[in-house]
């Protein structure tokens, strides 16, 4: 039997031997793995790299630098003193106007080889000077061709002096699914061109509060200030949308970004190519979203769709056979979820097209063809600035027409007289009239067109009851003794 000291020596020797064997085996395995590893020899073998997509698309994404002149009201510093304010009030000393140049930055996407660039309206809004810088550092002055606040899109043109500029082809934005991989390319915070990756997080977001045609692609790719106007691209190198906004409390990306779909972008680009004026598609419909409660009453088993509430007589929808109470379920085979999605589907179609729609009427499906037309400018606007000794002095008014209602985003306000502007400090402003108010009458005189206003206001020299519509509700104001 071995002594305790011999046993301890034996155990130590055995441990050293096992450790040596394990180390040898480990080194052998490492050498074997290293010998079997191979660096990919072509881009095609790099399965997890976005580099080929970036190389194909990034040169067409540009930086946009703009300058605008802003006016500031400044009070002389002496009169900011509380002592002077106490005795002389806020108006003493007046205010000094100071004009200065304000710079901003954003991104844009080249969509034609001869120099058309699409960006956001808010990137170049009010700019007096616009400069475009390409990824290869070439610089061009840019001309504003089309600017549309309601879609938050703008089209610029640069002169490449005979050179062919890199472009990104537009994708059919309906041909995309939640979960698809995408890249966002732009110039965040002015640090230079930056690429971030993510997925399509959601489609048809309509509660974003940007523009009148709110219908956005949502992504979790990092989008930050300066990315506005940049590209959202697919894995096949096509333009899926124009990055426009983020949801953030801090001002930085939290993984919720929004892009205007390429199908809307295409409509604006086509208008720019055809002369620069954006003529909106119009159907002569107003309606409301079909909720779950309404769906039961209509005999439908799901919410979604638009209930037709009003039709313009003789307009496209009226001629197509639609009736108040019909439910529009789909446009060109695409389900309609709410009123905003219907407006978007119509806005992306070309004038003169006949668009198939699916309608629910009397508990059965109907197939109709909806013509897409421009809103008529009838009657003529006859813009007039009201003057004189009466409550509406200082208001600018015009005859309402479907075209003006569409321009001012007043669905269904197809007739009457509307206030388009109000002069500061005017009588109309003091009685709290607002642009967008539709005048209905003064005292017992109705107002149907601009020509009726003078006679209605002259019906009294001291007392007026003004009836008007605001936000769809009829109101009245009494002025005078």
Image (tube, grey):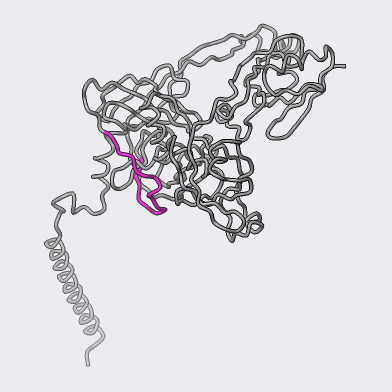
Which quarter of the rendered picture does the N terminus lie within? bottom left
Residue occupying image coordinates x 64% and y 56%: 298
Question: Residue 364 at x, y = what percent?
Answer: 57, 58
Q: Which residue is drawn at the image coordinates 35% and 21% (left, top)?
A: 142
Can residue 181 be found in the magenta stretch? yes
Residue 445: name its quadrant: top right
| As drawn, 204 above or below 112 | below
Image location (x, y in percent) of residue 351:
44, 34
Q: What is the span of residues highlighted in magenta in the rendered image?
A: 167-184
Left of 130 or right of it: where is 205? right
Look at the picture and state if 36 lies above or below 79: below
Say if the magenta span includes residue 346: no
Most distant residue in the top direction: 93
Q: Residue at x 28, y 22 (%)?
A: 139
Image mark count? 0
User: Is 319 in front, or is 82?
Assistant: 319
**Most distant residue in the right direction:** 481
**Rendered-image quadrant of the C terminus:** top right
Residue 63 in the image: state x and y as whole percent: 34, 28
């Amino acid at each position: 039997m071995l002594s305790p000291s011999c046993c301890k020596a034996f155990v130590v020797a055995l441990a050293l031997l096992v450790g040596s064997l394990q180390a040898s085996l480990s080194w052998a395995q490492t050498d074997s793995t290293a010998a079997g590893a191979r660096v990919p020899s072509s881009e095609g073998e790099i399965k997890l790299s976005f580099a080929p997509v970036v190389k194909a698309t990034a040169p067409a994404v540009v930086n946009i630098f703009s300058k605008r002149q802003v006016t500031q009201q400044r009070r002389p510093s002496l009169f900011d003193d509380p002592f002077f304010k106490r005795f002389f009030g806020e108006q003493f000393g007046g205010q000094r106007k100071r004009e200065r140049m304000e710079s901003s930055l954003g991104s844009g996407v080249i969509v034609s080889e001869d120099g058309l660039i699409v960006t956001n309206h808010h990137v170049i809004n009010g700019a007096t000077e616009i400069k475009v810088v390409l990824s290869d550092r070439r610089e061009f002055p840019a001309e504003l061709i089309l600017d549309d606040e309601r879609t938050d899109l703008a089209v610029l043109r640069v002169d490449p002096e005979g050179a062919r500029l890199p472009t990104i082809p537009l994708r059919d934005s309906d041909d995309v699914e939640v979960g698809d991989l995408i890249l966002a390319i732009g110039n965040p915070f002015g640090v230079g061109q930056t690429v971030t990756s993510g997925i399509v997080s959601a489609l048809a977001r309509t509660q974003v509060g940007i523009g009148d045609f709110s219908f956005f692609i949502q992504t979790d790719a990092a989008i930050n200030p300066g990315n506005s106007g940049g590209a959202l691209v697919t894995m096949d190198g096509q333009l899926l949308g124009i990055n426009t906004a983020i949801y953030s409390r801090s001002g930085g990306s939290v993984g919720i970004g929004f892009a205007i779909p390429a199908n809307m972008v295409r409509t604006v680009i086509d208008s720019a190519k055809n002369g620069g004026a954006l003529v909106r598609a119009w159907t002569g419909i107003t309606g409301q979203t079909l909720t779950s409660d309404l769906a039961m009453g209509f005999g439908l088993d799901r919410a979604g769709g638009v209930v037709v509430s009003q039709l313009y007589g003789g307009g496209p929808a009226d001629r197509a056979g639609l009736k108040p109470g019909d439910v529009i379920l789909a446009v060109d085979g695409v389900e309609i979820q709410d009123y905003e999605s219907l407006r978007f589907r119509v806005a992306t179609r070309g004038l003169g097209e006949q668009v198939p729609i699916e309608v629910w009427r009397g508990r059965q499906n109907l197939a109709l063809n909806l013509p897409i037309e421009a809103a008529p400018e009838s009657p003529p606007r006859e813009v007039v600035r009201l003057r004189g000794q009466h409550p509406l002095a200082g208001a600018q008014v015009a005859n309402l027409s479907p075209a003006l209602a569409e321009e001012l985003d007043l669905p269904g306000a197809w007739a009457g007289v509307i206030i388009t502007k109000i002069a500061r400090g005017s009588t109309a402003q003091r009685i709290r009239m607002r642009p967008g108010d539709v005048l209905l009458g003064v005292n017992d005189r109705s107002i149907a067109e601009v020509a009726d206003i003078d006679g209605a206001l002259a019906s009294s020299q001291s007392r007026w009851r003004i009836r008007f519509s605001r936000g769809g509700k009829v109101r009245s104001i009494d002025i005078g003794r």
